[in-house]
Amino acid sequence: MTATTLLGLALLAPGPVGAELAVPPLSGHVIDQTATFSPAQQASLEQTLQALEARKGSQLVVLMVVSTAPQSIEQYALRVAEQWKLGRKGVDDGAVLVIAKQDRALRLEVGYGLEGVLNDATSKRIVADTITPYFVQADFYGGVVAGVTQITHVIDGEPLPAVEPDNDSGLAGVRQYGPILLVLTLVGGGMLSLALGRVAGAVATGGAVALIAWLFAGAVGLALLAGIAALLFTLLAGGLGGRGFLGGLLLGSAGAGPRRGGFGGGGGSFGGGGASGRW
């Protein structure tokens, strides 16, 4: 075979297939790669979806991208859902609303556990009748809000397993109000020790701090730890041991947040249920 023939075959051969769009890291309930939502709009949506997860355990995420090319919206949405593993493991109560702005396409991908209530017909009505009319008017925030409202309404009517207590959230509550508890211990502990004596004052301070921590965090174990820390701090009269224990528990390490490791999927599974639409 001559060099000319080889060159001709090379020119006739198909070019390389375009690379698939990468699935972004799951950093929150709302991921907007198109800068369509304002910070206030994104924060409002995030709060709504966080409340749904706290109330029902279901994870619903909104993802807006420029385009899913070379994949279809269906292929990309399923890949996103499978990689993120939204919803609780074994319950599979996750869903993702993917919007490809340039493609003028959207897809509601539904986990196995929600397919009974968010079946294909219901999902199609939400996409076509609730969301798409807003998108036709270029009102993307209004369409997403309307769609999320309808989806959460449907999920709220589904008898899903109860949400398990989140100890990390309780710890975040204690840390959030840690400075207040610390001041209460310093001031209240000193006053109660003068009025009741060192031991009785320490016990009273520990009880008061435990009660307030329980009201803030809603976690008995963490409240008891805060109370013990306050008791020891008062007994040690602000010594290094008491200060280190109390500060470490109530204030936490710098940059600590309500979730260890950040937001993430719960291990849910998807099978391609849901609906797509265009505008």
Image: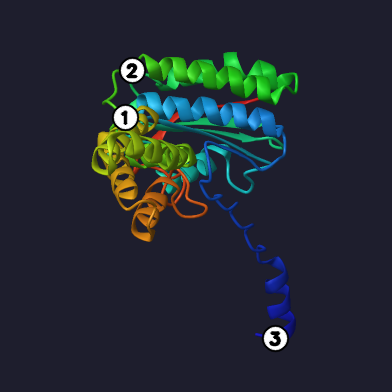
Nearer-N-terminus badge (2/1): 2
* Residue at 37% in and 41% down: 171
Q: Position of residue 122 (x, y in %)?
A: 45, 16
Counting every numbered tag in the picture gives 3
Q: Amino acid at mark 2?
A: Glu
Using a 10 Å C-alpha cutoff, classify the residue at mark 3 as few (fewer than 14 neighbours), some (14 to 19) or many (20 or more). Answer: few
Give the vertical position of 60 relative to 12 (above or below).
above
Instruction: Label 2, secondary structure: give it.
Output: loop
The residue tagged 2 is 158
Question: Of the residues under marks 3 and 2, which one precedes in the sequence?
Answer: 3
Q: Could you give the CA–CA distance between mark 2 and mark 1, rounded to whole angstroms?
A: 36 Å
Name the residue carrying label 1: 211
**Distance of mark 3 from mark 1, alpha carbons?**
88 Å
Nearer to us in this view, 77 or 164: 164
Q: Quadrant location of residue 13?
A: bottom right
Secondary element at tag 1: helix
- Tell me the number on the disc at residue 78: none
Q: Position of residue 18 (x, y in %)?
A: 64, 57
Q: Is residue 270 visible?
A: no
Name the residue rendered at 46%, 26% in the picture.
Answer: 51
Q: Which residue is mark 3?
A: 2
Q: Where does the image place residue 29, in percent across and percent down from the top left?
A: 52, 36
| Residue type at the position of mark 1 | Leu
Q: Are marks 3 and 2 in contact (CB under 8 Å)?
A: no
Front residue of 167 and 151:
167
Q: Position of residue 40 (x, y in %)?
A: 68, 29
On screen, 151 above or below 5? above
Please identify, in this view, whether the residue under mark 2 or under mark 1 is nearer the observer.
1
Q: Is residue 179 left or right of residue 131?
A: left
